[in-house]
């Protein structure tokens, strides 16, 4: 019993909170996001259906349709039709 | 009726006030949307202004390391604010997008045109969306700038540190000429400043000055005497102890360094505080006083430590194996180094405050470093080392080669660095040797003393331990645990107090350390995972609190609700256990979520584990589920008399994995619940305690069976504790040539009394048989009847008479009875 609890706890600690935001591309095409994080701009290409973990401590994202959004970190973003829905 | 009129007025006012309020709420959403963006825009403008202000201040305080740390923290906070401002506009963007999706695409060419309202709205939405995007773009740029600024501050600080250490000054005559000129000027200015201040203070602020000094003295005395009273066996070297133990020496050394130094620090701190609050200090005098106090505390600390470790006066208390003479010399050398280093800092600050040329500071440090280097070289040549078993006052030997070389290299290195012009580096190294060295040595002694206190049974030997034992009557185990706690708290103290001190020595600022501590406690980031110590601690605390509440609730339910609802003991037990497990599970969930661990990720883990559970933990899980079934179904309860396989006894405890059964020999057998669920379990006391006892009775075969049966029935009917209904029964089971076998079958209200009743019943039957003259036992061997004729009998008698004739007279003379017997036969 005790061992089971320990195992559960350890695995829970290992899978502890992922604070970074994750972006999923639900479109059929590869989408390119421009991410501003830590004072630098970088482009992230997302394959169709791929999920990427970005910005552990907040960032600005420019979406394929030209919208810009700010993320705190911890959000789940889905890209559909070039526009994003944040959950 | 003034009250009525007043009420009327109030009501009207209220109504009037309510009406516009309602109007406002109706118009609110549109207003809010418009103002939200404006608000964000204003906030961003303000942030931009702040950023510029920070940038300006960075340029202005380029040389002030402490100020730069603060500015960096401000820049980082500003960056977070900018992000928060942009995040706040996101919902509006979502709303606009949703509305645009609702409106759909504009009509194609040739299709009927839309209403003007729709066209208007479309236009408005598009404009607003662009505004938000522009705003976020602006925030993005600002954030980049803020991050760059904060990186630049880090860069400047690194440069500052490198400059301070590696900056080279040409050492030549010009330098010294310039410095001597500056020195005379500075001495004059310093004298004038201090005299002017002192005269002013003495004339106008005498009371404040004396008050501040007196108050700080009182504070230091309270601290000192309090700590002496509390820790006196640790601090003072007891005279009566001829040869103190190593632990005693260690702890005395540690505490006699720490506590007086802390008292000195408190004295310095409070004096500065009171002088400052009473407005005795002037802006040019304050830094001088503060550095003087700090230097004095540092020198006092080093001297105290050297005194504790070397104990120049008393060889028995020395922690290191050096000779008396060596200890005295070493103490003197260390003390001189501390004084020279302190003087360097003190004079340097005076130059800084009075605005003297930099060369003066450089020259002062130059001499200080050379003196310290020379002192190190001298240290290398003294001969303090003693071998094991040598008396303290004997002649010492030279240092081991490695230490000698180290001392020589450092000393000469300091001197050469100064001569080559690397005065900053020489000063830095000298400070490290004196102050950091002292701190590290104290830490080391502290660690040793903590280890010694937490060693098994060591605490009970100490004076504090003895006092605790007397005052609170603590046992050995408790004292040992207290000792462990004391040792651990010493470790903690060392870590919390000394590590920041060492870091401060290395050029880090207080704000740096603060932000690190804050970060360590709130977020440790490993890759994309963030762990918060505070969160985990809060989780554990909540879990413990949940456990306590559960126990209390369990007790309350059991004692107040269940006890009065007259439910069965088994149900009571089940409810209590179930409440306990539910509470633990709930507390666990609350604790886990408070620790910031996402429960959905836990579900993921559980999913991954389920396969492993299926194979590896099969038994445990099956027992666990069986335990739940046992609690719900209750085939037996605590106190029942059960038979499970070969185990028979009373159930003592039903827990979720296993059940404890106590046999009649008081052996506790732990039976896994799955065995109890899968196997057959006999329960003597399941629904009720009614039970039958069987007693087998055998009597002699010569008795009349009906008579015996009647007697038995009578006895059984007369026996206390047996039930009338179902009626007791006496069965004639078997007969043989030797015995008649009966069995009594009788029912008892409580089968647990069976043994006593059986015993009583047997006794009663035996007594009754004896009075009735019923033979019980069968003879050991069968009786064999012998037939003999009268002549034969006469013949045998005569033969016996003749055979015994010879022995009879003496025997008859002594006792006549056997003869009578013989004639009678």
Image: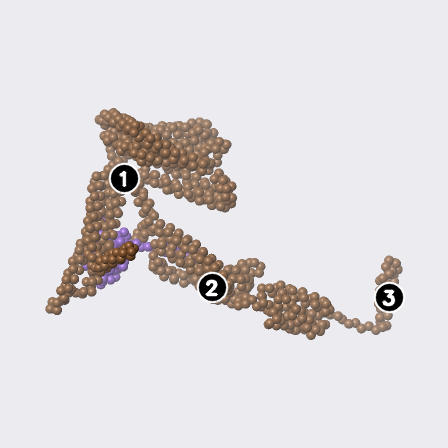
Chain colours: A purple, B brown
The percent position of residue B467, horizontal first and vertical second, equals: 49, 40
Q: Is residue B390 left or right of residue B75?
A: right
Q: Are marks 2 and 1 in contact (CB under 8 Å)?
A: no
- At a point 65% along the width and 64% down the height, the residue shown is B760
Viewer-side residue, B565 vs B349: B565
Question: Number of labelled discs?
Answer: 3
Q: Could you confirm whether marks 2 and 1 are on the same chain?
A: yes
Which circle marks residue B631 in the picture? 2
Whether residue B193 is visible: yes
Which circle marks residue B823 in the picture? 3
Q: Is residue B39 left or right of residue B610?
A: left
Which badge, 3 or 1, comes first in the chain's sequence?
1
- Tag 2: Cα neighbours inside 10 Å, few (<14), some, or many (≥20)? many
Whether residue B738 is visible: no
Which circle marks residue B66 in the picture? 1
Viewer-side residue, B30 vs B290: B30
Which badge, 3 or 2, comes first in the chain's sequence?
2
**Disc 2 from disc 1: Cα separation:** 66 Å
In the picture shown, does residue B754 fall above or below B402?
below
For mark 3, name the chain: B
């Amino acid at each position: 019993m005790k061992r089971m609890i320990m195992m559960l706890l350890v695995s829970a600690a290992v899978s502890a909170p992922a604070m970074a935001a994750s972006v999923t591309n639900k479109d059929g095409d590869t989408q390119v996001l421009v991410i501003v994080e830590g004072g630098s701009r970088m482009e992230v290409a997302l394959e169709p259906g791929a999920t990427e973990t970005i910005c552990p401590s907040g960032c600005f994202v420019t979406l394929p349709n030209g919208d810009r959004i700010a993320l705190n970190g911890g959000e789940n973003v889905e890209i559909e039709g070039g526009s994003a829905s944040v959950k | 009726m003034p009250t009525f009129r007043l009420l009327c007025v109030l009501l009207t006012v209220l109504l009037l006030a309510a009406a516009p309020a309602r109007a406002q709420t109706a118009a609110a959403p549109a207003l809010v949307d418009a103002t939200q963006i404006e608000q964000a825009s204003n906030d961003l403008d303000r942030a931009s202004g702040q950023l510029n202000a920070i940038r300006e201040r960075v340029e202005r305080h380029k040389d002030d390391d402490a100020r730069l740390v603060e500015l960096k923290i401000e820049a980082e906070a500003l960056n977070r604010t900018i992000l928060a401002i942009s995040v706040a506009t996101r919902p509006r963007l979502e709303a606009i997008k949703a509305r645009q999706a609702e409106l759909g695409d504009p009509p194609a060419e040739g299709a009927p045109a839309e209403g003007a309202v729709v066209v208007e709205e479309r236009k408005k939405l598009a404009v607003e969306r662009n505004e938000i995007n522009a705003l976020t773009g602006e925030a993005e740029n600002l954030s980049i700038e803020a991050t760059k600024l904060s990186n630049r501050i880090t860069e400047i600080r690194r440069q500052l540190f490198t400059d301070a250490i590696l900056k080279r000054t040409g050492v030549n005559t010009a330098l010294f000429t310039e410095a001597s000129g500056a020195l005379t000027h500075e001495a004059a200015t310093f004298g004038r400043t201090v005299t002017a201040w002192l005269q002013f203070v003495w004339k106008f602020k005498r009371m404040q000055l004396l008050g501040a000094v007196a108050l700080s003295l009182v504070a230091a005395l309270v601290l000192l005497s309090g700590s002496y009273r509390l820790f006196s066996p640790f601090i003072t070297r007891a005279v009566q102890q001829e040869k103190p133990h190593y632990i005693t020496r260690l702890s005395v050394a540690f505490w006699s360094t720490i506590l007086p130094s802390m008292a000195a620090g408190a004295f310095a701190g409070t004096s500065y505080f009171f002088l400052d609050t009473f407005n005795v200090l002037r802006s040019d005098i304050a830094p001088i006083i503060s550095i003087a106090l700090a230097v004095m505390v540092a020198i006092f600390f080093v001297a105290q430590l050297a005194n504790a470790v070397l104990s120049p006066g008393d060889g028995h208390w020395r922690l290191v194996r050096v000779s008396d003479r060596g200890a005295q010399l070493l103490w003197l050398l260390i003390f001189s180094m501390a004084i020279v280093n302190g003087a360097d800092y003190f004079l340097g600050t005076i130059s800084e405050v009075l605005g003297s040329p930099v060369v003066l500071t450089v020259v002062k440090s130059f001499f200080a470093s050379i003196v310290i280097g020379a002192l190190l070289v001298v240290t290398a040549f003294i001969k303090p080392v003693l071998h094991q078993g040598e008396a303290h006052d004997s002649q010492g030997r030279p240092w081991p080669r490695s230490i000698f070389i180290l001392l020589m290299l450092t000393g000469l290195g300091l001197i050469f660095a100064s001569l080559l012009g690397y005065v900053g580096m020489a000063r830095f190294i000298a400070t490290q040797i004196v102050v950091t060295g002292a701190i590290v040595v104290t830490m080391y002694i502290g660690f040793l003393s903590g280890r010694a206190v937490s060693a098994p049974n060591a605490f009970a030997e100490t004076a504090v331990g003895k006092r605790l034992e007397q005052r609170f009557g603590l046992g050995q185990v408790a004292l040992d645990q207290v000792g462990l706690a004391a040792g651990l708290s010493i470790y903690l103290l060392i870590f919390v107090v000394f590590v920041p001190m060492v870091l401060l020595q290395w050029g880090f600022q207080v704000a740096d350390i603060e932000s690190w501590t804050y970060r360590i406690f709130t977020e440790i980031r490993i890759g994309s995972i963030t762990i918060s110590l505070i969160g985990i601690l809060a989780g554990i605390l909540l879990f413990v609190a949940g456990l306590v509440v559960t126990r209390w609730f369990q007790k309350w339910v059991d004692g107040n609700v269940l006890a009065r609802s007259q439910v069965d003991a088994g149900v009571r037990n089940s409810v209590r256990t179930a409440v306990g497990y539910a509470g633990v599970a709930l507390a666990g969930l609350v604790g886990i979520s408070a620790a910031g661990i996402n429960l959905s990720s836990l579900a993921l883990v559980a999913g991954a584990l389920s396969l492993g559970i299926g194979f590896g933990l099969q038994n445990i899980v099956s027992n666990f589920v069986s335990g739940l079934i046992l609690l719900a179904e209750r085939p037996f309860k605590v106190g029942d008399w059960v038979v499970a396989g070969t185990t028979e006894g009373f159930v003592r405890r039903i827990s979720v994995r296993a059940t404890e059964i106590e046999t009649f020999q008081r052996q506790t057998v732990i039976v896994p619940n799955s065995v109890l669920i899968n196997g057959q379990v006999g329960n003597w006391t399941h629904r009720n305690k009614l039970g039958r006892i069987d007693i087998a009775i055998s009597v002699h075969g010569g008795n009349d069976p009906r008579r015996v049966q009647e007697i038995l029935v009578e006895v059984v009917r007369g026996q206390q504790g047996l039930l009338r209904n179902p009626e007791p029964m006496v069965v004639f089971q078997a007969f043989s040539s030797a015995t008649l076998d009966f069995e009594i079958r009788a029912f008892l209200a409580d089968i647990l009394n069976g043994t006593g009743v059986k015993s009583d019943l047997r006794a009663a039957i035996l007594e009754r048989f004896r009075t009735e003259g019923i033979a019980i036992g069968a003879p050991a061997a069968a009786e064999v009847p012998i037939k003999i004729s009268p002549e034969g009998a006469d013949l045998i008698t005569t033969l016996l008479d003749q055979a015994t004739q010879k022995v009879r007279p003496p025997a008859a003379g002594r006792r006549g009875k056997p003869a009578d017997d013989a004639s009678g036969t």
